[in-house]
Amino acid sequence: MSETTVTPDRPITVEETETAPGFIGVNVPRKEDRRLVQGEGVFVDDVKRHGMAYVHFVRSPYAHAAITRIDVSKATALEGVYGTLIGEEVAAETEPFFQIAPPPAGELKDYALAVGKVRHVGEPVVAVAAATRELARDAADLVEVDYEPLEPIVDMERAAEPSAPQLHDEAPANTIWQGNFDYGDYDAALAEADKVVRIKRLHFHRFSSTPLETSGAVVEYNRGTGQWTIHSNNQFPGFAIIMMGPALKVGMDKLRFVSQDIGGGFGSKICTHVQLVALCLLARKLKRAVNWTEWRTDQHTANSHGNERMFLDVEVPVRSDGTMLGFKARMIDDCGAFTRYEPLGCIIWAQVTPGVYRWRNVRVDFTQVCTNKSPCGPNRGYSRMQHLWFTERVIDIVAHELGLDPVEIRKRNYIRADEMPYETPNGCVYDSGDYERCLDEALKLIDYGSIETRRQDAESRGKLLGVGIGSTLDSGTNNFGQSTIVNPELQFSGNNEVASVKLDIFGEIVVTLGTTPQGQSHETTAAQVVADLLNVSPDDVNVRAGHDSYWNSHAGFSGTYASQFAVTGLGAVKGATEMLREQILKIGAGVLGAGSTDEVELAEGTVRRKDNPEAALPFMACGAIVNANNAVLPLELRDLTLNCRYVYVPPHQLPDTERKYGNLTLTYANQIHACIVEVDPETGVYEIVDYGAVDDCGVRINPQIVEGQVQGATAQSIGAATHETFVYDEDGNLLTPNFYDYHVPHALDMPPLKAAYVESPSPFTPLGAKGMGEGGGAGLSAVAAALQDALRNSGKPIVTSSSNPYHRVWELLQNPEESRQLVEVEER
Amino acid sequence: MIEPIRSQLIAVEVNGERHERDVEVRRLLVHFLRDDLDLTGTHVGCDTGNCGACTVIVDGVAIKSCMMLAVQADGSSIETVEGLAPDGELHPLQQAFSSFHALQCGYCTPGMLMSAKHLLDHNPEPTEAEIRRAIQGNICRCTGYVNIVEAIASAAKGGPT
């Protein structure tokens, strides 16, 4: 792999605090690795308790059915079966989960197990607990459930029709949320246009990043304290606790969340509160610890899919020079059978309303419906990925139809570097970035200059060559105030994250994080920041692995999601370390007889006088004095604890809910990808022969880790573009419920990846860094564009779906007219 | 009616240590290693033999331990990730995986390491294509394989310097 690292124009500036030796920006080896490469990580299924029961869920075989009878007697009669849990018990002992949606859909009832009715294949109906994994499955087979099948809805457009059956009595027309977004002056833009391009329908398909470790938990209940200890791989305990406390009718302190290593999450481990409540009830009922490790098939059928979305009646006013004035569209989002994290996706796309383009006039009619499919939830690039794919499809279809060059039309419409910080039509403030430069770098990576020669070479081999560009904005550090745009009654806003840094009795520097990493290397990057501020090596910094809500180290929004650790997590680490640094300086000044902290400095693991480095107090002595010998300290220094907790709070403000206007995230990292495909016109089989990814996430704390995120996210989007899809039949059966049918990229599937980096520091964040890791979605756009380009002389079909497996390309080749009918150009 | 045998005594050697256990005949080798021997470094990712997180080496052959019954392993010698660094000094593959950032969440890593070890045991100087073929049965959802391939190639050449 070749790599070009682009030196930033502007020097990387870190805030005023001294950061002398400079571990920030260096490829420090990961602290996490030593345990993980030896099989010494502790993942949730590695946790064992004496007499632990294994739980298996009996799941619905129907997409939509009434439950008429449940009989667990044969299962409970089996030796080694500890007990069961059914929906009636859940309904009696818990409240339905809190709903984010406003009424009427906000009244819908979602419980830990199906109550009276099932709404998707795989929905948990009964939980069975037994002495072994195998026995739990045997017993589940003996549970009898009778169903009366109901008509299922699998098509999101059908869901809103008056004749469609209702999933939830509380959600008329199966509508969860509807809102109109109107920014700029769309009517004036339309009147001004020289040409109008109309696209009838674009489709973003259902898939999931499918982490290799499935969801799971080991849950214990203490009858003396009434507290549950939940060892799990949930990646957003703050959200889980908000959902579970009211459901279980307990205060938050009764829910202790513990995790160490998590085997990938990508968002799909946010909404496990549903299963966790069932486990809490079972642990209490059976008076024993319970283990649930999700089967792969269950994760695919019933955990958390990425949202599926339709873009209908799209209209794009364009000037004759290729300047696009905005767009109008009707969007329908399918959240599956239950809401869970939804309808937040109905606003989260608006973080990136115009994408990377200077589009000022936007009108969107956005509706979210429920269907008899797996519930959806955040999935890497959550809700923005769908929308950004749409913006990239729009630009390439317009270019295709008007005969404009895809590079030129982008450069004409990109927001320019000199316009940063840039306020979008809906009030979001893009902090920094240089999209044109990123595009140039991406084109260099794939040697765009030689494209016509390579096209001819491919043709001589009977292949069709195409080139495609894609972009994403990886918006991070959510302003949870955006939730009030979907429901003004909600009392959420801002964001926060916590870190504690202390100097312990033998001088150890110990860091505790509020986050729940799943591979994002938080221990390593936190140590780099601490090392720079205390003038030590990252090897001297002990970062505790994992999360434990008992540590008092978390806040309401703690977790690892939505591209924010480099801002919120490291912002907290920086804040806490600065507090500790100040305290060490004060103790040093006091003990060493310096007049003020200005006369001492931190160096070589000591605090020492600047005028006499021989007069030095080792960190060990500082730690020992404060923790175990503090009577020697003068009274004025006795309030120092060397144990500093800091909560980072970004400077967010409440959005204007009427206008749906405001800055919805703090940072906007960007990615520009370019790829080249070769298509076999006989079969539709294609190969990605060249791929370049350029990422700009501001200051890179650890470039190797950033590069790893870029490569991984790109692999996921190439997988989603080419193979991965959750396909349902008309009865609502998932046809791709395991890794046989749901093909994720293997080592041989991956094209050669080239990567380059531009660093545009964020002016708004503690370290100039931006959250990153979710930017892979550009690959979905780049592949779609490359295929459309490759087929330009084969009937000029339009690529209308994000899912483009070989057979889809073959269909486009066979019947280009079918897609061509979806697009028209009005010349004025 | 003759009752089928439900359990059987087996003897295996795992990372050089001999274990004798009475196991349920339907118990998978991976669950035997994880639940009975407490060797939790070997992971389960897919239940269908696709992902390779459970890869171990049985009598010199890399196999997916979710596709083998524990009783089938009776009498065999098994290597798992826990045996790669017996004295605490990392195996060159483990060191290379760390140096090249070939792991993020680390869940696929034990299986990936065992597939890579099997490759290098039989082909000390593999080409990139041979490396990719050797790990095509191991799914990684985090890395896109770029750094894994580089790490294995580096370990084959004596490891990172």
Image: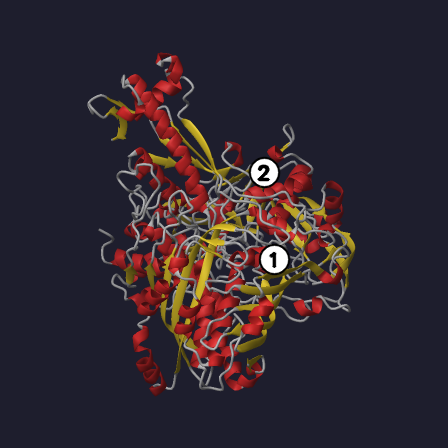
Chain label for disc 2 = A
Image position, residue A526 (x, y; %):
38, 41
Q: Nearer the viewer, residue A240 or A257?
A: A240
Give the SS element for disc 2.
Answer: loop
Snapshot quadrant of residue A590: top left
Q: Amino acid at mark 2?
A: Gly
Chain label for disc 1 = A
Q: Nearer the viewer, mark 1 or mark 2?
A: 1
Residue where numbered disc 1 is placed: A346
Snapshot quadrant of residue A366: bottom right
Residue A397 versus residue A477 in the image, above or below:
below
Residue where numbered disc 2 is placed: A51
Image position, residue B137 (x, y; %):
42, 63
Give the SS element for disc 1.
Answer: helix
Colour scheme in use: secondary structure
Task: Rate crowding at label 2 as few (under 14), some (14 to 19) or many (20 or more) other CA atoms within 10 Å.
Answer: few
Q: Amino acid at mark 1?
A: Cys
Image position, residue A25 (x, y; %):
31, 47
Residue A60 left/right relative to B13: right
Q: Quadrant of the N terminus of chain A?
A: bottom left
